Structures are given as structure tokens and as C-alpha cells.
Image (cartoon, coloured by chain):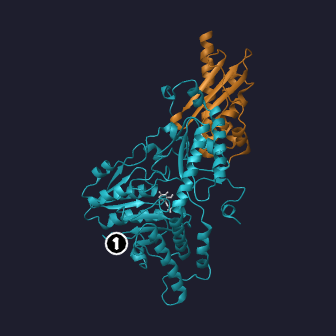
Amino acid sequence: MAYSDKLIDHYENPRNIGSLDKNSEDVGTGLVGAPACGDVMKLQIKVGADGLIEDAKFKTFGCGSAIASSSLVTEWVKGKTVDEAETIKNTDIAKHLALPPVKIHCSVLAEDAIKAAIADYRAKTKKAE
Amino acid sequence: MNVQTQIRRNDQPIYLDYQATTPMDPRVLEAMMPYFTHQFGNPHSRSHSYGWEAEEGVEKARGQVAKLIGADEKEVIFTSGATESNNLAIRGVAEFYKDRKNHIVTTVTEHKCVLDTCRHLQEQGFEVTYLPVQKNGLIDLDELRAAITDKTVVVSVMAVNNEIGVIQPLAEIGKICREKKTFFHTDAAQAAGKIALDVEAMNIDLMSISGHKIYGPKGIGALYVRRKPRVRLVPLIVGGGQERGFRSGTLPTPLCVGLGAAAEICMKEMGDEAERLAKLQARMLKGLQSKLTDIVVNGDLEHRIPGNLNISFAYVEGESLMMGIKNLAVSSGSACTSASLEPSYVLRALGVEEDMAHTSLRIGLGRFTTEHEVDTAVEELVRHVKKLREMSPLWEMAQEGIDIKSIEWAAH
Ligand SMILES: Cc1ncc(COP(=O)(O)O)c(C=O)c1O
Ligand code: FES
């Protein structure tokens, strides 16, 4: 399968690998997929006092397209508000990385991961209120 | 030019996929060449020397193949490959004896061409028993014994598995089949030329062989069909009645000659080659185990051809690993289930958990593999497994002591 240069770049030089403190109040964590399915994505966001996402980290067990999709999403969400980040669509990811049709669901997983991280963050802030 | 550079250009990855196919041995190509050019005759032409020369080439090749498996040359017929041989053997006997017998025994880890042939026969009313395998990939002989009935026409058990390289106990299986008066077919595509095979000592009635797995050409194979006691088959391809009527069509002389030459080289060099490959296999495994934790060899390591390793690198998805090790041509059965590829049914049959099945690679070593290539492969694998583990949420959990099975994953 021929992959795009952008995809290969994200796979070979993934951005923002790592973990944030999942117990911290300003960190939202999304964990999606399942080991038995061959894909697990963990995506975390850290939201500043100004409501902007100041940091994002990921770890992914999955194919190269899944790794690239999650890497790309961490780049995209930084500097956005939580509401803005929520509008990221898997189709945008797939288009940017020129994913072949059988790899579209890898970008869906990345969209799910960011949504899950946002939901976790919101649940925490609601509790804090 | 040395053999290495004939086989691989410098800009190509290191070939470690010898179960998928093998490069042709240059000596095989040399033996074939005259039959592509001036010795082009139809081996079935009886009226001139062109035909006679071609026939001589074909018959010599038949003898070379027969010798490799301890058969008589009259018992070897040429086919287009192991797929056709398997189809012909299983379908051929099933149909010939269908008035008296209607049951077939095979295993769950057979090659797709055997499984599909059996499914096809099931649709036509035959009964098929698919024997499970044990954790090591081998069948349980008591289960085999229990599965055979007086309606069983053939037992088809592969000699060596193409994914995990394990060797089934052929002599024991042959003995049971003979006692129970049922035919024994074995798919020896991955076994011929790699391990010693003897159709007499092992009581084998039908055996499939493939040219391109033994450093011969693609598009040629053979089927051994026992003459005493006689095994009868309904042919798949009818016409001029060549190959004792089992397989009509003009024989591809150069390919037959190539298969024969390949068989003879295997016959002569099998012992030394197996020894050399066993050293390389051990070197690769030791290299990986000394630098990585949490790796598992799938399938029995003892009852295995030395040219195969199938390894699960826990917490690292196989397809992403393959993307990293660009310099190595290996194979992976995995990719997440939502994509086109499924985790290997062979690994699942061994009871390998799905999450581990997704992390496996098949590494095939062969005649032209060098120590240097093995060392390069180890270095590259270790580097990428470590890199991908740093990226893996499952590895992180494992390091924190979290059991990934204790988590409720949202399956999709
Ligand atoms: C065990 C086994 N059987 C059958 C085949 C099919 O052989 P051929 O490519 O000669 O049709 C293969 C090769 O993929 C194999 O590994
Ligand atoms: S995550 Fe399924 S193939 Fe990429």
C-alpha cells in the first residue's frame, strides 16, 4: 500500500507522544478501541485557565494510519477551545493524511478519542463546579 | 556475479519471507534455459527428436521429484502447483469413492486451498471433520484416531504449516490411516526439500508439492499418487489424457525440468542447509530475546522447520511494526479486524489471544539468508519494537502493573 508523505512523516516522527496526569482536574483522557480489535488509542488534553487546550498527548497501539491520525489530532487541538476541538471530523483527518479506504476507520478512532477526552474533561469540570 | 547479488538488488529489503515463496536457485534457472530455447519441443510429440528431447527432460525431472520423497517415478504427476495438487487429491479421491465413503478428516490449520476444497465438498454432501490443534500447533493423535470412521475416504493433514512452521507427526498419522484403511494425503508444500520425507516409511498415499517453495519456478507442482495399493482419482482437468489421465494438458517442459532440478538440489543439500538454518534461527531468536522482553514464539519450537519463526511482540501492533521495518520483507497476518485483514486463523487455532495475534510477525529464513542479514534484522526489529512500545498505551499499562484484561474495552 502506498502511503502519503504526510502520513509517513507522522508515523516516523510522531508528535506529542506521552502521557499527562490523568488525575489532574484540567486533564481530559480518552481511551478508545480494544486490544482484541488490534487498536487502542489514548488521547489526553490539558486545558488552560483561558479555556484553550494548551497541551495534548497520545499513545496508540494500532496500525501506522492509526498512529498518524492520533499524532495529527494532537497537533490540531492545541490552541483550540474545547468546543472548537470537538468539531474535528474524521473526514478532515482522512483527507489530510490521504488515507486509503480501508484505513478510514483509523481516523474515526482518532475522532472518537478526542471526543472521549473532551467528555472526560467536561465531566471533571462539572463535578468541580 | 555472486548468488547474493543475483537474488537481491542492493536497494531491495532483506528477504525474510521464505514461506511465501523462495527465489529460484540460479542452478535451477540454468537447467531450465535450454528448454525455453532450442529444446522447445512438445514432450508428448512422438515423431521427432524435438519431442523426444523434451520428454527426456520431463521424465528425468519426474525421477528427481520421486527420489526426494522415496517414491517411484510412475507415481508422480505434474500440476500447476500445490493448490491444484491439493484440489485434485482431495476432490479427486472423494468423488471417485463417493458411492462407498463420504467423510473427510482434515485440520483447522490447513492452507486455505485445502479448507476451501473441503467446504466445497461439504456443499456437495460430504461430511468433513476439522481436527483442532493443540497449543503447540500439532494435532492430537487420539483425536485423529477417534475421528476416523469406516466412511472416511481420506485424511488430509499438512506436513509443515506455512505460518508457524510446525511439523506434524507424519509417520504416526500414516500408521493410523493404514490401520483404519483410509487414504492419507499430506500437503507438503512447505515440507518437501526441507525435511526428510518418505512415502513408504510414512504410509503416505497422496502428497502435494510446490515448485516455488523449494527454490524452483512458480506455476509448477507435483502430486504423488500411490500405485500400490492403488489410489484412484477423478481428474479435475480432462482432455488429452496426459499424466496417466489424472491431469490433461501439454506439460510445461522448462517448469518441470526446473522442479526436478530444484528437488535434486534439495535432496543433496538438505542436511547441511537445515543445520545452517537452525543456527540462524537460534541466532535470531537469541538476539531478540536478549534485547526484548515480552516476546512469544507461536507454535512448537522443537517440531519445527529451522527456516521459520513466528513471533508475537506483545503490545506492538504487527502492521505498524511492518511499516517501521522497511528494510525487512516479512509477513504479518494481523491488522485490526475492522480493516480487510483478520488476525491469523492459524494463531487463533493455537489459542493465541486476539490481542497477541495482532502483534505477530512471520519471519522466514532460507537458502540465501546470511548471518549478517539476521543480525541486521534483529537490530532493526529491536529498535522499532522499542520505539513502538514507547508509543503504546498497552505497554504503558503493563509497566504500571495494570492487567489489560481487567479493563472493560468498548469493542466495536
Ligand atoms: C502449505 C501450503 N499449501 C499450499 C500452498 C499453495 O501452493 P501453490 O502456490 O504452489 O499453489 C502453499 C503456498 O502458499 C502453502 O504454503
Ligand atoms: S486501526 Fe484498524 S487498520 Fe488502522
Q: Residue furthest bottom?
A: B47
Task: Please report the residue visible at 61 percent of the width from the left and 13 percent of the height from the top.
Answer: A126
User: What type is the residue that disc 1 sits on?
Assistant: Arg
Q: Position of residue B110 (x, y in %)?
A: 43, 53
Chain shown in cyan: B
Q: Position of residue B277 (x, y in %)?
A: 56, 54
Whether ligand 1 has any atom under 8 Å from the Cβ at mark 1 is answered as no
Up the image or down, A63 lies above or below B258; here it is above
The chain containing the residue under callout 1 comes to: B
Up the image or down, B146 lies above or below B254; here it is above
Q: Position of residue B209 (x, y in %)?
A: 47, 64
Query: Is residue B124 among what the camera can see?
Result: no
- Quarter of the image for residue B116 reads bottom left
Task: Please report the residue visible at 50 percent of the width from the left and 74 percent of the height from the top.
Answer: B61
Q: Which residue is mark 1?
A: B227
Q: Position of residue B290 (x, y in %)?
A: 60, 38
